[in-house]
Amino acid sequence: MSYFSSFRTQVELPLSDLTRMLCLEDEAEAAAICDFYGLNLSASGTSVFLTGTSHIYPKTDADGTPVVPPLVRLRMYGVA
C-alpha cells in the first residue's frame, strides 16, 4: 500500500503503521508523539494526517527549548 500520491496533498497514515515504522510500544504512544509535534489526528484518533506543506515544530518552553515528551525522555535514559 502506497501512502504517497502526486494527486493528493494530504495523506492519512494509520497510527498502527506509524507505530510499526517508529518501533513504538503502542498506538497511544504514536498519538502522543503526533500531538507533541502538532500533527492532526483523524476524528476517530486512529490515523494521522500528513501533508507535504506542513511544518512540524516541537512544543517548546518559554526559552524556546524543545520540551521532550515523557515517553521519549524515559527511553533516552534507558528507563522505559
Image (cartoon, rainbow, N blue to C red):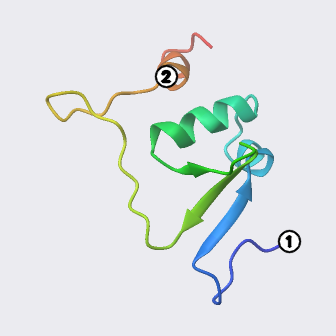
The structure residue drawn at horizontal position 28% and vertical position 34%, both measured from the top left corner, is 60
Which residue is rendered at x = 65% and y = 89% of the image?
Answer: 7
Please report contact status of discs 1 and 2: CB closer than 8 Å, yes or no. no
Residue designated by label 1: 1
**Res 30 quadrant in image:** top right
What amino acid is found at the position of numbered circle 2 in the picture?
Met
**Pick the front one: 30 or 47:** 47
Tag of residue 23: none
Say which amino acid is labelled 1: Met
- Farthest residue to the bottom: give it: 7
Q: Specify the quadrant that holds the N terminus.
A: bottom right
> 60 and 45: which one is in front?
45
Q: Is residue 58 left or right of residue 1?
A: left
SS type, badge 2: helix
Residue 4 is left or right of residue 77, and the answer is right
Q: Position of residue 23 (x, y in %)?
A: 71, 39
User: In the image, is residue 46 above or below residue 24?
Assistant: below
Image location (x, y in percent) of residue 8: 64, 82
In the image, 43 versus 70, the foreground residue is 43
User: Circle 2 is placed at which residue position?
Assistant: 76
Give the residue displayed 22% in from the left and 32% down from the top. Answer: 65
Q: How far is mark 1 from mark 2, CA to CA?
A: 32 Å
